Amino acid sequence: EVLISQQDVLDSITAIELVVQATSIELGIVDTGDRSSYIDFHASDGVDYNARIVRNIGVNGNLNIEQTGSGNIDVTNSGTGDINLIASASRFVQVNPNNADADFRVKGVADSGLIYADASTDRVGVGTVTPAHKLDVVGNTQVSGTLYAVAISNDTVGNLEISGTAGTQVIVN
């Protein structure tokens, strides 16, 4: 069995920079070339890591927060401020950029399906977690402005059908 002291490891790694200050921890490599850097969090034995924050290669590399377990990744604010997702000008906030079968849900106080995007069916529900159409709204709906539709229909019992083709205008007052 070979034992290596912590000091031996630190002495052999002369290019790592670790700066701990009262308000920050900086971790990096003082060297040339691109590389990833990461912080691992270990919560159980025999696992490489349970959670990891990774800064990927390059000046414009992605910042990833990864988890190997089945628990949630929560962003919590117990104070009175907001939680903001901020993108600079000409950028956007994207959900599910890898086109995975991962649904997206916004819960209300009394409505667990206030907004629900079902990735497997490419449908969005408002007031439902089982949307039957591209946009499925359960509840009263108000449209301010013009509502454009190629066809509006209902089941055979509902008797509401408005159809039109290009150049045909159907007006219901």
Image (cartoon, grey):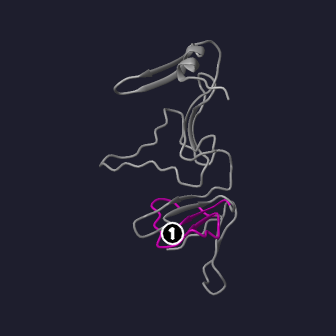
At horizontal 64% and vertical 19% (from top left) the residue drawn is 34
At horizontal 60% and vertical 51% (from top left) the residue drawn is 69
At horizontal 63% and vertical 78% (from top left) the residue drawn is 154
Residue found farthest to the left = 80
Q: Mark 1 points at which residue?
A: 127
At horizontal 48% and vertical 65% (from top left) the residue drawn is 114
Segment colored magenta:
122-149
Q: Is residue 77 left or right of residue 107?
A: left
Q: Which of the two residues, 44 or 143, is positioned nearer the viewer here?
A: 44
The part of the image, by quadrant, that contains residue 40 is top right
Across and down, in percent, residue 118 comes to: 63, 61
Binning the other alpha carbons within 10 Å of mark 1 as few (below 14), some (14 to 19) or many (20 upward) gives: many
Q: What residue type is labelled 1?
A: Gly
| Quadrant of image for the N terminus | top right
Q: Is the magenta stretch mostly helix, strand or loop?
A: loop
Across and down, in percent, residue 44 comes to: 56, 47
Residue found farthest to the bottom = 157
Across and down, in percent, residue 79 comes to: 30, 48
Q: What element carries label 1?
A: loop
